[in-house]
Image: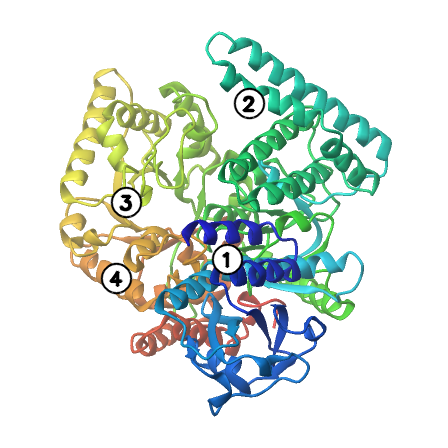
Amino acid sequence: MLAILQRIIQEVSQANDIERALAIIVKRVKEAMKVDVCSAYLSNESQHRHILMASDGLNPQSIGRAGLVFGQGLVSLVAERAETVNLESAPDHPRYHFVPGTDEQNYCAFLGVPIIHHRKVLGVLVVQQRARRRFKEDENAFLMTVAAQLAGAIAHAEVSGGIAKLVSNVSEGVSLKGLPGSPGVGIGTGLVIYPPADLDAVPDRQVEDVETEVEVFREAVALAQDDIRDLQTRLSTALSKEDQALFDAYLQMLGSASMIEQVIGRIRAGSWASGALRETINEHVRVFESMDDPYMRERSADVKDLGRRILRCLQKDRQAPPPYPERTVLVGDEITATMLAEAPIDRLVGVISAKGSSSSHVAILSRALGIPAVVGVKELPVVRMEGQSLIADGYNGRVYVAPSENVRKEYQRLAAEEAQMTADLAELRDEPAQTPDGFRIPLYANTGLLSDITPSLLSGAEGIGLYRTEFPFMVRDRFPTEDEQFHIYSQVMEAFAPKPVVLRTLDVGGDKSLPYFPIKEENPFLGWRGIRITLDHPELFLVQVRAMLRAADSLDRLSILLPMISSISELDESLKLIQQAYHELLEDGEAVAKPRVGAMIEVPSLVYQIEAVAKRVDFISVGTNDLTQYLLAVDRNNGSVAELYDSLSPAVILAIKLVVEGAARHYCPVSICGEMAGDPRAVLVLLALGVDSLSMSASSLLRIKWVIRQFERAKAQQLLGTVLTMESAKEIRQYLGNALVEAGLGGLVRAGNK
């Protein structure tokens, strides 16, 4: 059964639309279970009906027409219960309802299982038999497994099919749900960014010069043939004749008129070569994967490999940057910092990523650049988004594809209001972040790129609260030298003089890797990362600290921040090494000042040892991104659980309360440097808790200053009293959002300025 299930999943995952996906399912399940009927019903919320969308066994004329009103029949019973219904004789059940035109009256035995995707019932999968019998447990288990495994593929196919219909103007638009990544509204044209040699990620794209595109494809095929012949020659002495036959098979396929002509046919129909290749290869793969012979099924992998080889050859001549539309909405399965950095900032109006969460790096970088972003759009059909008219609502985490004129006009109005609000906020740049009742809280900038310095200065930041030193390490092909680091840190210190600067020591591992220092782990976020790496390599740590101290010279403006501390022994060892670097420089005749040293509170263990930490350091900085991740046991880059990640969880708020109270007993100041500091709702809580400073992306700073200048601290403390009685992040987020709206700050938490 496992092999059958895998084949079904493979076929469905290749389906271009929901109709094709469901047709495959009902046919394959009927064959596997040897039943008389297999049918799939999809739940249509707008029509309030379960519609028969596919069947192998019922009257074909009823497909797409027949259905049951919600609450009617056995299919509704399965959907309501969200569990299996197994009946020996369906007509005898009180909920049985015959659907005219389906010929369903001929069948007795009934087994229905719900198709559930992310807690939502998408539909019901049903098998039926003429004979009276109760389906066995293993049959029940198989059908449940099919439904569970295929729910995601069905959801994806449903969205993908909806997008496809936009091309022929059959649909008025598609709305997709994701997660808020960066606030704002981005309205523009989709440009798909994808990694090289990834055939499945190639987007749909139209061409005007068909004959030139055909020639480009023919040249790529010729290059692929040459590459394979070279491989065959180089390995001729090392491989047997049987193994060399694989290369002959590749060359034979490349010379196959059917495959090559199919690609050319698609190009002549208007598709660019890469998209035509993707569709043709996928079609051939489906044929092989549907074969009964295991040997022939395995040949599908050879077809995929061949497709990737041709794609690489196509991409060799296409190294130029893609044609960025005037208003570009960048779309990708997983958008990296490099992809964002390569895009012309003057054309970039939005970011949409299928993967990620509100605290993933694409979201953090988008906020730093002030670009609206929607992340974690699970059902995003990336390949169909090229050239589409898009709206990215970074407040509500929603994407609109080919929006109606009414939707577009409304978002244009909201975007105009937001632009006016941003312009108005610029007047606060030189004003203090002080509450009406006199409570002053310094606001600093988070940065990691030299290009961020000017925006940070223009935002009115009172210094740098977190400089991420890993970026200079990530863009090189080796560890930067002490002098290279010294020059970078010097530029940062000079740009912000005489304001204070906090430099964080190297924080790699987890989702931040160095190409020349790869770390492969099954669970990287709980593995070798942050201070654990640099303590295991003190030579790296000492070089970096020496560069920091030299850059600060003898001025008392430098603070060094230690990431990912999880025990007091790690803190003590780090402090000892900083002392060593300081004394070494003094011995070398360098005029350096002893830095202030702080510890990041990211690991829950230190929350409960906060007083021991406060006794040893000059300041504490709470990294709410990782602290939230570890407290809630939610991988913040995993789209499947991203909705569970929320820094306004009661557990996170109580943890920060413990940190602030414990540090205060030793007169140790506490800063918040995670993304929570830039959340207008969360700032009300942080203000009430009594944190000493906040550090955030430059794009958030004026918005947070506006909140602080509008709210008396006494009012924030009153809100906190209510928040501490609440038991869910959703309840807290809504309550604080309402408080902002009532104070006339609604534009900070939703589109528009009201």
Instruction: Give the amino acid type for the residue marked by disc 3 in the picture.
Output: Leu
Crowdedness near tag 2: few (<14), some (14–19) or many (≥20) residues, C-alpha within 10 Å: few
Alpha-carbon span between mark 4 and mark 3: 20 Å
Instruction: Give the amino acid type for the residue marked by disc 4 in the picture.
Output: Ala
Alpha-carbon span between mark 3 and mark 1: 42 Å
Task: List x then y, in percent, for residue 676.
Answer: 40, 58
Between marks 3 and 1 in the image, the one whose residue lies nearer the viewer: 3
Q: Nearer the viewer, residue 99 or 133?
A: 133
Q: Of label 4 and label 3, which has the lower sequence position?
A: 3
Task: List x then y, in percent, for residue 612.
Answer: 13, 50
Residue of label 2: 246
Crowdedness near tag 3: few (<14), some (14–19) or many (≥20) residues, C-alpha within 10 Å: few
At mark 3, the secondary structure is helix
At mark 4, the secondary structure is helix
Crowdedness near tag 1: few (<14), some (14–19) or many (≥20) residues, C-alpha within 10 Å: few
Do the residues under discs 3 and 1 have CB atoms within 8 angstroms?
A: no
Residue of label 4: 655
Between marks 2 and 3 in the image, the one whose residue lies nearer the viewer: 2
Tag on residue 431? 1
Instruction: Give the amino acid type for the residue marked by disc 1 in the picture.
Output: Glu
Tag on residue 85? none
Task: List x then y, in percent, for residue 512.
Answer: 40, 38
Alpha-carbon span between mark 1 and mark 4: 31 Å
Instruction: Give the amino acid type for the residue marked by disc 2 in the picture.
Output: Leu
Tag on residue 526? 3
At mark 1, the secondary structure is loop
Q: Of label 3 and label 1, which has the lower sequence position?
A: 1
